C-alpha cells in the first residue's frame, strides 16, 4: 500500500517538475520573443533617420527652391539605394515661403514637433541668419547649402555651410578679373534688404581698397524690384570700367536686360550667376562674369555621373543651386556613416572632421567655423553658357 502511495507521490512530483520545466521553457521562449520584438523595433527605428529640409518652395525664391529640392531628392535616392550609411534617410520637407520668418517657424516645428536632430537649410543668408540661432539653442545640427554671407558659421558649432562665403569668393574674384580686365573705376548695385547681397557688397568694397580700385557711390534696390532704370542710368553717367551686381536669382536677369537696353557695354560681374539666369537674360547675359565654385564640365569625382543622372531625371543640366544641394546630402551622409551614433553631437563632430572629402566640387573640407573650404572659380558667359574665365 505504502509502495503504491510513494509511487503516486513520486509520479506527481515528476509531473509537477516536468510541468514547471515546460512553463519555464515557454516563459523563456516568450521572453526571447519579446526581446526580439524590442530589438527589431529598435533596429527599425535606427534603419530610418529623419532629416528636416527647409527650403523656399513658394514666394520670391521658389524657382531656386525647386531646383534645390531636385538636387536633394536625387542624392537621397542614390544614397538610400547604395546603402552608404547602412540606414535609410528620410526628408521631412518644410516650405520657408522665402522668408526668414518662415524658416524660423520651420525650424521650431521640425525640432519641437517632429523631433529631428538634423536640418538641412535654410537657403538664403537672410533666413539662415534668423534660423541658425534656433539650432544653437536646441543643440541640433543645421547645414545650409547655399547661404554665403560672412559670420553665420560662427553662430554655433552645430551649424555648417556648403556654399563658399563672400570673404573667400570676392577677394579672389576681384584679383582674377582685375588682373585681366584692368578696371580702375567700378560701379556697384546691390539688394539692401538681402543679407548675402549686402555682405558681398561690403566684401567687394574691401577688395577694391586692397587693389586701389575707385568705386562709385553704391546703387541699391530691394528684393522684388523690377525696374532698375534709375540706378542703371546713374551708373552709366558715372562711366565705370565694370559693374558689380550683388542680387538674388529673380533680380539678376532684369538687371542685365535693362543695362544692355540702356547701352551699358562694360563687363557686368554678377553674384552666383547660374545657367538659369543666363537663359532668362538671353543675349543680355553674354560676357557677364561670375564667381562660383562649379561647372557641369568639371572633371571632379562623380561630377559626370551626377550631371548625366540629373539631366536624365529632370530634363535639364543641373545648375549651381541643385549641385550644392546634391553635394550637401552626400557630405551629411559621410558624417552619419562615420559617426559612432546618430546623436546630434556625434554628427556635429563627424561633420567638423570632414577634410578633403571627394565631391563634385572637388576636395571638400569644413574650416574651424563650419564653413566650406574648396577651390572657387571665375566664369564668363560665352555663346549663352558659363565657361571658365581665362
Image (cartoon, rainbow, N blue to C red):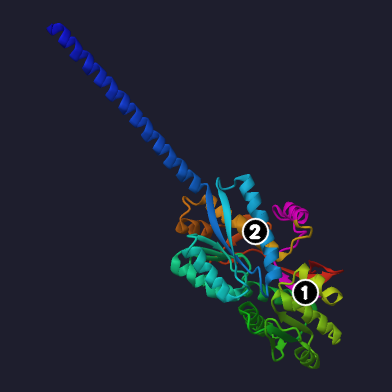
Taking the view exactly as shown, the residue that stands out farthest to the front is: 1
Residue 345 visible, this orientation: yes
Residue 229 image point, x, y percent:
78, 89
The N terminus lies in quadrant: top left
80 in magenta:
no
Q: Residue at 66% across / 82% down in the picture?
A: 201
**Viewer-closest of 390 and 105:** 105
> What residue do we see at 73% from left, 76% from top?
250
Q: Is the residue under label 2 in contact with that under label 1 (CB below 8 Å)?
A: no
Residue under label 2: 72
Classify 148 as above or below 318. Answer: below
Residue 356 shows in this picture: no
Q: Provide residue 370's location: percent of width, then percent of height.
A: 54, 66
Instruction: Write down the region rendered in magenta.
Output: 286-313
**How many C-alpha atoms fall within 10 Å of the one at disc 1: few (<14), some, or many (≥20)?**
many
Q: Position of residue 335 (x, y in %)?
A: 54, 54
State which quadrant residue 190 falls in.
Answer: bottom right
Helix or strand or loop: what does disc 1 sit on? strand
Q: Is residue 37 left or right of residue 58?
A: left
Residue 240 or 146: which is nearer the viewer? 146
- Secondary structure under tag 2 reads helix
Q: Nearer the viewer, mark 1 or mark 2?
A: 2
Amino acid at each position: 500500500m505504502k509502495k503504491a502511495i510513494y509511487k503516486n507521490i513520486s509520479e506527481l512530483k515528476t509531473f509537477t517538475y516536468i510541468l514547471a520545466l515546460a512553463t519555464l521553457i515557454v516563459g523563456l521562449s516568450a521572453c526571447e520573443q519579446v526581446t526580439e520584438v524590442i530589438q527589431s523595433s529598435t533596429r527599425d527605428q535606427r534603419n530610418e533617420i529623419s532629416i528636416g529640409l527647409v527650403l523656399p518652395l513658394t514666394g520670391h525664391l521658389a524657382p531656386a527652391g525647386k531646383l534645390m529640392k531636385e538636387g536633394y531628392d536625387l542624392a537621397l535616392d542614390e544614397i538610400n539605394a547604395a546603402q552608404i550609411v547602412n540606414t535609410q534617410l528620410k526628408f521631412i520637407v518644410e516650405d520657408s515661403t522665402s522668408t526668414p520668418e518662415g524658416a524660423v517657424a520651420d525650424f521650431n516645428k521640425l525640432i519641437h514637433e517632429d523631433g529631428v536632430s538634423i536640418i538641412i537649410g535654410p537657403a538664403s543668408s537672410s533666413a539662415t541668419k534668423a534660423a541658425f540661432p534656433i539650432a544653437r539653442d536646441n543643440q541640433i545640427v543645421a547645414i545650409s547649402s547655399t547661404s554665403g554671407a560672412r559670420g553665420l558659421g560662427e553662430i554655433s558649432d552645430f551649424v555648417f555651410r556648403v556654399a563658399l562665403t563672400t570673404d573667400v569668393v570676392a577677394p579672389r574674384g576681384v584679383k582674377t578679373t582685375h588682373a585681366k580686365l584692368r578696371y580702375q573705376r567700378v560701379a556697384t548695385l546691390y539688394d539692401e534688404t538681402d543679407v548675402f547681397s549686402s555682405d558681398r557688397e561690403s566684401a567687394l568694397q574691401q577688395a577694391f581698397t586692397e587693389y586701389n580700385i575707385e568705386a562709385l557711390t553704391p546703387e541699391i534696390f530691394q528684393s522684388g524690384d523690377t525696374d532698375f532704370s534709375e540706378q542703371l542710368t546713374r551708373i552709366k553717367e558715372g562711366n565705370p570700367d565694370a559693374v558689380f551686381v550683388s542680387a538674388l536669382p529673380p533680380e539678376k536677369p532684369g538687371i542685365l536686360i535693362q543695362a544692355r537696353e540702356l547701352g551699358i557695354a562694360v563687363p557686368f560681374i554678377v553674384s552666383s550667376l547660374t545657367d538659369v539666369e543666363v537663359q532668362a537674360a538671353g543675349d543680355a547675359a553674354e560676357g557677364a562674369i561670375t564667381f562660383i565654385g562649379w561647372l557641369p564640365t568639371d572633371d571632379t569625382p562623380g561630377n559626370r555621373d551626377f550631371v548625366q543622372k540629373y539631366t536624365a531625371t529632370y530634363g535639364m543640366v543641373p545648375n549651381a543651386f541643385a549641385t550644392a544641394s546634391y553635394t550637401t546630402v552626400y557630405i551629411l551622409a559621410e558624417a552619419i556613416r562615420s559617426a559612432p551614433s546618430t546623436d546630434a553631437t556625434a554628427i556635429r563632430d563627424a561633420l567638423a572632421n570632414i577634410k578633403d572629402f571627394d565631391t563634385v566640387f572637388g576636395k571638400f573640407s569644413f574650416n574651424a567655423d563650419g564653413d566650406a573650404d574648396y577651390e572657387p572659380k571665375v566664369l564668363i558667359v560665352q555663346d549663352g553658357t558659363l565657361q571658365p574665365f581665362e
